Image: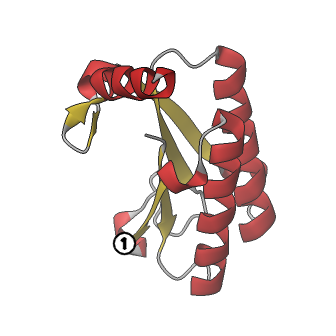
Amino acid sequence: MPVLELHLVEGDHSPAEHARLLGLLSRRYAEVLGSPVERVRAYLTLHPREQWAVGGSTHAEPAPYFTAIVLEGRPVEQRHRLLADLTDLIVDVLGVERSRVRGRVIQVPPDDWAIGGVPASGARRDEIAARRR
């Protein structure tokens, strides 16, 4: 289920930095959630400079924004660690000022998230039942 969306301004960072960051973010996300990395989906959206503003200015310094989507019920400590760790990686890889990075965690009820077309609430029950057999 873990899904990560990262928004950056086009041209501020190299394709190599993008690729490295997506890999590191995926692995860290899996580590924090205790989830297999194969389940993590990480997406990068690049915005043309004229479609990005900070404080009303399209000429502002880089200001990355990310969203981490998790199933409802994750402990607050885990969500806070996710926010801190993902911010750390963005700062380290892209060299941006920590104070300019913004992020949020969105919790989704298991009945409102599908895995292969099946609500996660049902998919979870199936996984648990399969482990018992």
Q: Position of residue 120 (x, y in %)?
A: 32, 28
**Left or right of residue 19: residue 50:** left
Q: Residue furthest front?
A: 133
Above or below residue 90? Residue 46 is below
Identify the residue under disc 1: 50
* Residue nearest the viewer, comparing 61 with 104: 104
Closest to the observer, 85 or 122:
122
Quarter holding the C terminus is top left
Left or right: where 120 falls relative to 37 = left
Within the image, what quadrant is residue 95 found in? bottom right
Q: Nearer the viewer, residue 100 or 57?
A: 100
Q: Amino acid at mark 1?
A: Glu
Q: Nearer the viewer, residue 17 or 131?
A: 131
- The image position of residue 106, as x and y in percent, is 45, 29
In the picture as drawn, the residue positioned furthest to the left comes out as 117
Q: Which quadrant of the structure image shows residue 74?
A: top right
Structural crowding at the residue carrying mark 1, measured as other residues with C-alpha within 10 Å and reported as few (<14), some (14–19) or many (≥20): few
Residue 90 seen in this snapshot: yes
The answer to whether one can see residue 61 in this image is: no
Q: Residue at x 52, y 83 (%)?
A: 11
Numbered-mark total: 1
Q: Position of residue 32 (x, y in %)?
A: 70, 37
Residue at position x 51%, y 40% in the image: 68
What percent of the width, then of the height, locates residue 30? 63, 45
* Left/right of residue 132 with respect to residue 93 in the rendered view: left
Kind of element beneath mark 1? helix
Residue at 63% over, 15% down: 75
Above or below residue 46? Residue 116 is: above
